[in-house]
Amino acid sequence: MLLRIFCVIGCYAATAVALAQNATLAASIEVFVFPAAGQDATLQSIDEAECYNWAVDRTNSDPFQLTQQAAQQAAAADRAMWRAEQAGQGAAGRSAAAGIVTGALVGGIFGNRGRKSTRRAAATGALIGGASGSRQRSQAQSQATRSVASQAARQQANTEQQLTNFKNAFGACLEANDYVARF
């Protein structure tokens, strides 16, 4: 019951904002409504508010909350992509460091020409380790990117489906009250 009261208050607040901007509640959620029985603007606003509440109740979805949710999901996906890129760059650095150590050891074991040979072996090891790290980073980033993108796409599809379900319910209610509704 308390949820319904908040929904009603929220709906009337959304209606007030829409009317202040010379738009109807339906227009603010991209639903086009025609008063087929000649209803005036005041009655249409009341009917839209009631149908909005009815659709929220039936679908457990509020399009204004879905919009906020979609924005939060997009921000979370951006953060996850950034973390995946950072993790991949860390792998390249570790591989280059390992290459330097391995190159220095190989140069020390097989190179009997002193420090210069050891430095060359270390540099070669760093190049090989860096190339290996670059390949590992690319693979890690690619896998992480695919995972994040897949999850973001699923979330977006779910949000779009919830919005479509809401608009169908909202339109059905309006049509039952002698309006023509399309989205």
Image (cartoon, rainbow, N blue to C red):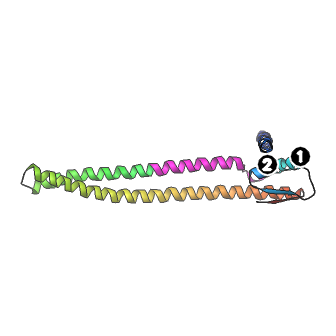
Q: In this orientation, which residue lies closer to the viewer: 32 or 115?
A: 32
Outermost residue toward the front in this view: 22
Q: Does 83 sit left or right of 27 as displayed?
A: left
Q: Position of residue 63 (x, y in %)?
A: 71, 50
Is 59 a magenta residue? yes
Number of labels in the image equals 2
Q: Main secondary structure of the magenta part?
A: helix
Q: Residue at x 66, y 57 (%)?
A: 160
For residue 131, what is the image quadrant?
bottom left
Is residue 105 at all visible to an observer of this figure?
no
Percent position (x, y) of residue 8? 80, 42
Residue at horizontal 57%, vertical 50%? 74
Residue 58 is at least partly visible in this image: yes
Identify the residue under disc 2: 25
Residue 84 lies, in percent from the top left, at 44, 52
Q: Amino acid at mark 1?
A: Thr
Residue for badge 1? 42
Q: Residue 80's x, y, as percent?
A: 49, 50
User: Secondary structure beneath disc 1?
Assistant: helix
The residue range painted magenta reads: 56-82
Name the residue rendered at 42%, 56% in the picture.
Answer: 141
Quarter of the picture containing the C terminus is bottom right
